[in-house]
Image (spheres, grey):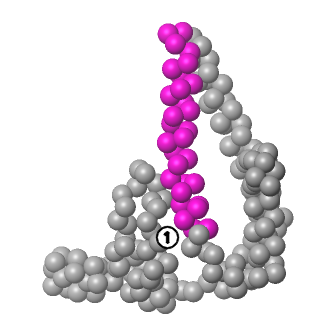
Amino acid sequence: MWTFLRRRSLTQWIIAAMVVGVLIGVFFPQFAVSLRPISTVFLRMIKSIIVPLIFGTLVVGIAGHGDDMKRVGRLALKSIIYFEVVTTLALFIGLLAVNILKPGVGVSLVSPETAGAVAVGGQVTFTGVLEHIVPQSFSRPPRTTKCSRSCSGPCSSRSGSRRCAAERRRRCSIL
């Protein structure tokens, strides 16, 4: 049995995991919702490794060309052209998809006044701690503020900036 498992390629494992994830979501939706912290941690790990991976790839690619600056320049030009073409293509595909599918039609959003009341004063849970152990990015500071729109708005206190700062701290929860 171990040899069967070892012979599977990474692509086969990824496809099998996707199929298992879809089956769990379809047949056991409550259990799938309880797995959300695992998916959040996985996505945070993927996001945190992308920038160093791309940077390392670029450094190794440029260093592999040695002292031939002409080849490095050609590589840079090809990279910029490729980036521009693929970005423009993705933009057009996204615009086409939005205009055809019209996502968000019929969704009612909560007004900013009531949304601020919901966002402030969250409870610290074990799931939240597990999700925030892994950083979203190595370039971001680990402490971020989770503020409602009312935090950046005008202060209701008219007696100086110290009270405004205290009011904003009260309205915003720091993770």
Q: Residue drawn 55% across and 47% down? A: 50
Q: Residue drawn 53% across and 26% down? A: 60
Q: Quadrant of the C terminus?
A: bottom left
Q: Which corner quadrant of the image does residue 38 belong to?
A: bottom right
Left or right: 100 with respect to 172? right
In this view of the protein, can residue 153 be seen by the observer? no
Left or right: 6 with respect to 122? right
Left or right: 174 with respect to 58? left
Q: Which residues are magenta?
A: 39-68
Q: Is residue 134 magenta?
A: no
Q: Is residue 48 magenta?
A: yes
Q: Residue drawn 50% across and 10% down? A: 67
* Label 1, residues with CA under 10 Å away: few <14, some 14-19, many ≥20: many
Q: Amino acid at mark 1?
A: Glu
Q: Nearer the viewer, residue 110 or 4?
A: 4
What is the x, y in percent for residue 115?
Answer: 49, 85
What is the x, y in percent for residue 133?
Answer: 43, 66
In this view of the protein, can residue 128 be seen by the observer? yes
Q: Is residue 159 above or below residue 57?
A: below
The residue beneath circle 1 is: 131
Q: Nearer the viewer, residue 47 or 115?
A: 47
**Which secondary structure is most common in the magenta stretch?**
helix
Left or right: 32 with respect to 135? right
What is the x, y in percent for residue 172?
Answer: 34, 79
Q: Which corner quadrant of the image does residue 18 belong to?
A: bottom right
Q: Nearer the viewer, residue 83 or 58?
A: 58
Q: Which secondary structure lies at badge 1?
A: helix
Q: Quadrant of the N terminus?
A: bottom right
Q: Residue drawn 50% across and 28% down? A: 59
Q: Is residue 105 above or below residue 51?
A: below
